Image (cartoon, rainbow, N blue to C red):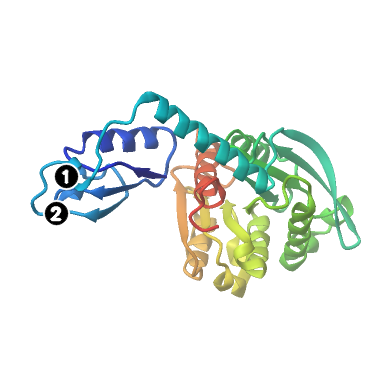
């Protein structure tokens, strides 16, 4: 979030604005002002993550000295400005293909000869869409992924929980670990989203679990900057192999602290990533994140990552 003030004198107003922004969920705060005294950043400390200022005159004594007209703005002008901003925001959302009314339905996605079953949930005025890639032995009915999807929907992100394999294919162990096949199905679903009314111009992100995480990274490598972000939950990113180095989408790897083997595999896979990335370890959590509060921590970390990179004002989209 970018906060713009008319200038900094004592810094109290700017600090309060930054605190409010963080309380509303902002994960990265930039404070930008046209004028401030020398050393103004140290005066504000860690109130913001980044500071921008055009002028810091040595003879600074008041913000008004930098303005030809520093008269007060009356309430009517403020209301008119805010109303105009709201109207422009609504226009931008409409132009970007975002939907005003929410919807929820079961869908069928065609991927070559396969008919894939999924569940689409679009909240009102969705700001992005997250496509779930389930892992071995899991499906769109996974209670863990359904819980994460609910948290994302509440944050304004559409979700598509999709079975990447047919029921017959899912019984074949080799298909479950066929990362190339799973990735191709994920890419077909991405194309489907691009054709879907109301979703066609929304940023697309991937959420993968277990082998689905490898498929998500493989597909993200193929599609480059078309994919806004990737999150892996207890995943096997190592199975994406050489494709890891081709991923450009910001990637978050979430692993349980007590899931030692998978944690080690994720640490090695992270070393092969060249994109923006982070490894989030949930203390005490095992592979399925069944411990109290563990899955909630996963959902909140995924939500924050997606909103930062595939939300209303993404840093990488």
Q: Position of residue 19 (x, y in %)?
A: 32, 35
Residue that protrudes farthest toward the left in the picture: 59
Q: Is residue 30 left or right of residue 295?
A: left
Q: Position of residue 70 (x, y in %)?
A: 24, 38
Q: Position of residue 89 (x, y in %)?
A: 56, 40
Q: Is residue 130 left or right of residue 245?
A: right
Give the quarter of the image for residue 26.
top left
Q: Is residue 30 left or right of residue 187?
A: left
- Which quarter of the rendered picture does the N terminus lie within? top left
| Front tag of 1 and 2 | 1
Give the quarter of the image for residue 9.
top left
* Circle number at residue 65: 1
Measured in 3D between alpha carbons, the distance from the residue under mark 1 to the one under mark 2, in whole angstroms, is 10 Å
Residue occupying the point 16% across, 37% down: 10
* Circle number at residue 99: none
- Which quarter of the rendered picture does the C terminus lie within? bottom right
Q: Earlier in the sequence, mark 1 or mark 2?
A: 2
Q: Which residue is mark 2?
A: 57
Q: Count the marks: how many?
A: 2
Q: Depth check: give the residue in front, 127 or 176.
A: 127
Q: Can you say whether 18 is above or below 208 in the image?
A: above
- Asked whether the beta carbons under mark 1 and mark 2 sit within 8 Å of each other, the answer is yes
Q: Depth check: give the residue in front, 272 or 50.
A: 50
């Amino acid at each position: 979030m970018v906060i713009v003030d008319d200038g900094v004198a004592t810094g109290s107003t700017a600090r309060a604005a930054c605190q409010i922004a963080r309380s509303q969920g902002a994960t990265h705060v930039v404070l930008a002002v046209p004028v401030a005294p020398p050393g103004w950043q140290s005066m504000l400390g860690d109130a913001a993550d980044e500071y921008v200022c055009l002028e810091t005159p040595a003879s600074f004594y008041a913000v008004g000295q930098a303005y030809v007209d520093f008269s007060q703005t009356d309430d009517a002008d403020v209301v008119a400005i805010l109303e105009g901003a709201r109207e422009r925001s609504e226009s931008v959302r409409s132009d970007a293909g975002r939907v005003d009314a929410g919807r929820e339905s079961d869908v069928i996605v065609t991927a070559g000869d396969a008919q894939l079953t999924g569940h689409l949930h679009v909240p009102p005025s969705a700001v992005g869409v997250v496509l779930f890639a389930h892992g071995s032995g899991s499906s769109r009915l996974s209670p863990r992924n359904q819980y994460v999807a609910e948290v994302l929907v509440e944050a304004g992100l559409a979700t598509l929980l999709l079975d990447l394999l047919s029921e017959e294919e899912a019984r074949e162990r080799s298909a479950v670990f066929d990362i190339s096949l799973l990735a191709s199905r994920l890419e077909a679903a991405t194309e489907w989203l691009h054709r879907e009314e109301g979703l066609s111009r929304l940023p697309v992100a991937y959420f993968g679990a277990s082998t689905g995480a490898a498929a998500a990274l493989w597909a993200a490598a193929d599609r480059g900057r078309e994919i806004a972000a990737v999150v892996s939950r207890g995943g096997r990113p190592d199975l994406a192999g050489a494709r890891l180095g081709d991923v450009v989408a910001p990637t978050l790897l979430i692993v349980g602290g007590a899931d030692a083997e998978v944690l080690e595999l994720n640490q090695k896979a992270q070393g092969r990533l060249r994109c923006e990335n982070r490894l989030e370890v949930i203390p005490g959590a095992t592979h399925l994140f069944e411990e109290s509060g563990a899955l909630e921590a996963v959902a909140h970390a995924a939500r924050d990552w997606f909103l930062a990179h595939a939300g209303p004002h993404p840093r990488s989209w």
